[in-house]
């Protein structure tokens, strides 16, 4: 036990003495979180937009145009703007606002839209209810009714389709009202009986339900993704200092003295794992504080873990165990500092790339999702997602913890096997 605590003290002293390396382990993830969150914030908000700002240019000012504006205003997904900074929005300004990302969508309702609509409907009525002295026009002589919709290019295709469908439904509702009034007027002339009722559009509704057991994953904000993602990256980046430290000790003969001592060969490995797992908690706590206090000051969303601080810290310990055991395994297998640093850095970068740290998994093609599930960094990120997005406690993180523990055991086993066989 004395030897075990001695090893822990030695690891702590080695960390403290390497002030540059220790500073890098904290500075690197801080810079990455700030930089990547700011770069992705605007893009992610557009991809997961809950309420779109839209510019509406209503040149019709009649039943169709007014009904479209009113209908869009009543929809929870849209913020309808007909003015911008005190000025009325014309077509040129609407195009400019959408192009520079101020608004996600622009709509032009041309002048005489209502008149053209009424004329088309009236012509159809003359075909069905001909009367002396009325003329039925050829369809080619009737002008088309066209509502122009233009999007910010980054808006998803599904959202575009939903918007077009909503506008089409609003126009269809207006057409129904116009047709109803036109036929009512014609029937009044025939029957001599007046009808003052409106068409009961309110009788036609859509009921919406959400299934609570849905397997669909919530989409994280830029803050909810980048803080845990770069926390995981920083923790696993401990591979490089850990591996090079083991090689240095082997080259200096420390491993040989350890083999000749009566203490267990595993003791130094376990002491390293404890120290570096606690270092992982310190890194994660630092980035958590940045997400809670600094990112909101920069205009981004706050990093909210719903009070699950204990779960966050305990799960970070599991990530630290997996990362430190992997670093020890790399150091035990590699023969030189060069091999350890090259393999360690490349493996972490590749595992981060395929694991959804750089590009979130919801933006990946289907084929890449299977590869992502092979990365231990993805398992760690999934666990953080469960805490941040689903407000899960530590006892509900079964699968990510099991995967990380198995990876820890496998890496530690490799470290012991190769550490004992390594020729000094």
Image (spheres, grey):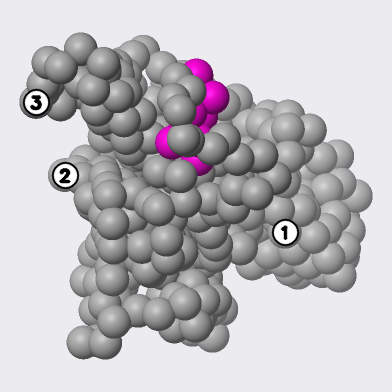
Judge whether 91 appears above or below 218 on screen.
below
**Tag 2 or tag 3, which sits nearer the N-term?**
3
* 412 on left or right of 322: right
**Residue 196: mark:** 3
Q: Marks 1 and 2, how far apart in space?
A: 31 Å
Residue drawn at point x = 79 percent, y = 60 percent: 346
Q: Image quadrant of residue 55?
A: bottom left
Query: Whole-percent x and y of residue 74?
Result: 21, 45
Residue drawn at point x = 40 percent, y = 43 percent: 118
- Which element carries disc 3, helix, strand or loop? loop
Query: Whole-percent x and y of residue 257?
Result: 69, 55
**Tag 3 or tag 1, which sits nearer the N-term?**
3
Note whether residue 230 is visible. no
Q: Marks 1 and 3, how far apart in space?
A: 72 Å
**Residue 307: mark:** 2
Magenta span contains residue 318: no
**Tag 2 or tag 1, which sits nearer the N-term?**
2
Residue drawn at point x = 28 percent, y = 56 percent: 62
Magenta span contains residue 126: yes
- Which element carries disc 1, helix, strand or loop? helix
**Residue 349: mark:** 1
Which range is magenta?
Answer: 120-128
Query: Whole-percent x and y of residue 391?
Result: 26, 34
């Amino acid at each position: 036990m004395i030897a075990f605590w001695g090893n822990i003290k030695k690891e702590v002293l080695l960390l403290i003495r390497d002030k540059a390396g220790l500073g890098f382990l904290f500075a690197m993830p801080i810079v990455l979180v700030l930089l990547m969150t700011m770069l992705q914030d605007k893009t992610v908000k557009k991809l997961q937009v809950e309420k779109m700002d839209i510019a509406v240019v209503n040149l019709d000012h009649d039943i169709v145009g007014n009904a479209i504006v009113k209908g869009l205003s009543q929809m929870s997904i849209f913020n309808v703007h007909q003015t911008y900074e005190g000025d009325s929005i014309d077509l040129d300004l609407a195009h400019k606002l959408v192009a520079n990302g101020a608004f996600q969508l622009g709509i032009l309702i041309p002048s005489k839209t209502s008149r053209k609509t009424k004329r088309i409907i009236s012509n159809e009525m003359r075909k069905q209810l001909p009367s002396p002295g009325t003329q039925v026009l050829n369809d080619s002589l009737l002008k088309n009714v066209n509502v122009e919709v233009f999007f910010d290019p980054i808006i998803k295709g599904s959202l575009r389709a939903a918007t077009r469908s909503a506008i089409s439904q609003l126009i269809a509702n207006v057409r129904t009202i116009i047709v109803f009034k036109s036929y009512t007027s014609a029937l009044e002339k025939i029957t001599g009986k007046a009808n003052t009722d409106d068409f009961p559009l309110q009788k036609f509704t859509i009921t919406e339900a959400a299934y609570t057991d849905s397997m669909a994953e919530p989409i994280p904000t830029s803050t909810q993704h980048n803080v845990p993602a770069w926390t995981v990256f920083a923790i696993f980046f401990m591979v490089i200092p850990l591996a090079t430290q083991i090689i240095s000790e082997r080259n200096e003969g420390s491993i040989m003295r350890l083999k000749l001592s009566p203490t267990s060969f595993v003791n130094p490995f376990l002491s390293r794992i404890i120290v570096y797992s606690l270092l992982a908690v310190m890194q994660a706590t630092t980035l958590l504080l940045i997400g809670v206090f600094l990112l909101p000051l920069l205009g981004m969303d706050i990093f909210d873990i719903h009070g699950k601080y204990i779960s966050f810290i305990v799960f970070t310990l599991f990530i630290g165990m997996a990362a430190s055991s992997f670093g020890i395994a790399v150091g035990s297998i590699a023969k030189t500092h060069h091999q350890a640093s090259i393999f360690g850095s490349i493996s972490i970068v590749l595992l981060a790339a395929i694991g959804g740290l750089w590009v979130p998994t919801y933006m990946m093609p289907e084929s890449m999702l299977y590869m992502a599930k092979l990365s231990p960094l993805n398992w760690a990120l999934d666990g953080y997602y469960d805490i941040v997005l689903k407000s899960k406690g530590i006892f509900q993180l079964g699968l990510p913890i099991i995967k990380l523990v198995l990876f820890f055991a496998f890496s530690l086993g490799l470290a012991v096997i190769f550490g004992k066989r390594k020729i000094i």
